[in-house]
Amino acid sequence: MDAVDARNVSFRYGQADDAPALESVSLGVAPGECVVLCGASGCGKTTFTRVVNGLAPSFFRGTLSGDVLTCGLDAARVPIDRLTPLVGSVFQNPKTQYFNANTTDELAFPCENMGMDAAEINRRVADAAGRFGVTDLLDRGIFRLSGGQKQRVAMAAAVVLGPRLVVLDEPTGNLDAQAIDAMRDLVVRMKADGVSVLVAEHRLAWLNGVADRYAVFDAGRIVREYPADEFLALSPDHVAAMGLRTLDPEPCRRAVARLAAVPAEGDGPDGRTALLRTRDLVVGHGRGRRRAFSRTVPDLSLARGEIVGLMGRNGTGKTTLVRTLTGLAGPLSGRIELDGRTARPRDLMRAGFMVMQDVNYQLFSDSVREELMIGSDADDADACARCDRVLADLDLPRLADRHPMSLSGGQKQRVAIGSALMCGKDLIVLDEPTSGLDRFHMEQVGRLLRRLAQRGRAVLVVTHDEELAAGWCDRVIDLEAARG
Amino acid sequence: MRTAATAPTSRRDGRSLDPRAKLYLLLLANLMLFFHVGLATQATMIALFLAPMLVAGRVRMAARFAVLYAAMTALGLLDPDALGVPQLHVVSALAVGASMMLPCFATGAYAFTTTSASAFVCAMRRMRVPEAVVVPCVVIIRFFPTILEDYRRIREAMALRGIATGAFAWVRHPARSLEYVVVPLLMNATNVAQDLSVAALTKGLGRDGVHTSRTTIRMRAADWLAMAACTLPLALDAAGVI
């Protein structure tokens, strides 16, 4: 029996007049097979995973037509808990798919809900942890784990009941290259156990050699299915034309390595002076005996008009460094200079801005225009003119009266950047601006970075996204290599 | 109570009371408000409530509550008329109110910071609380740390925008400060709630039938002792003996 057998499935969220999220999709997944759903954002691949694991239409309301058999059960009609022992699910955001504060409790959670006794639960937890290499992560506080570790535990939790199908919805959205490699090993492991794997994903390269079949979605339909060898043989241009991320990460990796070797432009003869410069900087958090983390940063400089990528795997202190550079945290020792003068955290906070990975934290007003005008006087003609210029510069005039929360992720990012430009910030730091974005939106972010640099801002991007770094950064600072 | 099955996770819980005993202490703290206990009883009860905190290793927390209580009681004992500052009546009244509320906060803080979510859920199920109550409680417990984290992020975002975040700003523009914090907080809470519900549904949290627990909880002599010790002063006070 197939793990998934979907025939002519159509689905519409909410009101019937909305465009359908899926339109007559038919797809089967055989036992032990790994099928990848790809396509641009909003193409319907996530919706398809929800239909398969029973979340749509039971949780995500809408109207469904056609037949979906998941492990032989009618996914649209049986209660979702009938599917629990058969289907494991892993989602994009490692922060919000945990129910327990402790990793072992999290692995035990599905078993407890199935009413197993304590001995059986412990046996299963130990077994799943052993097979998926997370034994060393057991009995740890969830909040102390890195994103990659959380996602590995989530994978183990998805198989603890011994499901026949595992559904992954953009599982690598927030992960670094090493963590993604670990995910790949786990998928291989699942397949070896005869578990079918259905993955909706933007980043495709990590699935090379693991995936058996690719289904390309566009506007709710499967436009074409490819066997793995045929798909991997497609030319890079063809892949790009379908709006997909690269299948071959090597050229990007080489480009990033090249960019990491580019020396910083100092106060050289070209006359470009550094906006910001660090000297013997040590960043970290915690003081004295409670020192939790500290890290010496090699001297670096950022110039106006330059896009610098800050890379290196999770836990190398990228976030702590940019928090220090924007004045949110004080340096443990060493100093930071702004335009050649030693700057206090307060000065850095005035000069710099950080676009957070979760941009929802940074929007406070009920319209885009008001958002930009926070801190300025609404009657000040000069400020209003500046606001109009910033809006025009970021393609936001059409959205000026919209509520920021009604905007898409990319639009919110632009509003946050607009607010930074209004405050006259010189240094714009972006934390993982392209996590979970498809090629089109990634390139849009890249163009935005370029525009900021052309307007004379120093742009620092914290990213794991090699395609973004290769395509748009002027140079790359690799914190991991620097540690060496 | 450390059995082989529970040894690892209950190491921390091992030195704290059973969740049911904790809830009982919380109930007693609320009853204290109801019975309007005398000062001696109140002080005794506070001491009794802080003792389990010390045993659980929450020395700082216990010290803070003790100092706060002492300060509030001292302020409440002031006689503004004797001092010739009648305006102080407001202060001493507030202080008395605060010292009456304090036992609730102390027992609540103890219950929440020393109980793992799974132990709490297990306790509720043992007490035959219906699932319709248990599930929302699980979600709320899961939410607290997230909201705290969100709050920190929002404060940072405000600082970067040059929006004042200090105590002074709260006094000067309370409504605006609240709006700046609450709007993003709620927006994120909505997203988190949806993600958590989805994760929980696929893991069978809403399933009909028996749910078990890997964490085992058991009432020990210490639990009964703590409950009895804390009940005694309140009962004596309510009966008019003290």
Image (cartoon, rainbow, N blue to C red):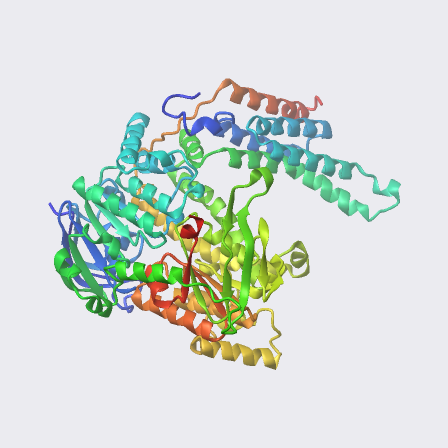
- Identified at 12% across, 60% down, the residue is A230
- Identified at 60% across, 80% down, the residue is A382
- Identified at 25% across, 44% down, the residue is A185
- Placement of the N terminus of chain B among the 4 image quadrants: top left
Does residue B119 appear in the picture of this structure?
A: yes
Q: Quadrant of residue B229?
A: top right
Does residue B163 appear in the picture of this structure?
A: no
Q: Quadrant of residue A254?
A: bottom left
Q: Position of residue B86 (x, y in %)?
A: 84, 47
Q: Name the side, left or right, on which A215 lies relative to A399.
A: left
Q: Name the side, left or right, on which B136 lies relative to A221.
A: right
Residue B8 or residue A399, whichever sits in front: B8
Q: Position of residue A404 (x, y in %)?
A: 46, 67
Q: Position of residue A7 (x, y in %)?
A: 14, 57
B62 over A249 or under it: above or below: above
Q: Position of residue A463 (x, y in %)?
A: 40, 58
Residue lying at the far front in this picture: please name it.
Answer: A269
- Placement of the C terminus of chain B among the 4 image quadrants: top right
Residue lying at the far left in this picture: please name it.
Answer: A1
Q: Name the side, left or right, on which B6 lies relative to A181.
A: right
- Identified at 44% across, 69% down, the residue is A414
Q: Name the side, left or right, on which A380 lies relative to A222.
A: right
Residue A54 or residue A394, whichever sits in front: A394
Residue B161 or residue B43, whichever sits in front: B161
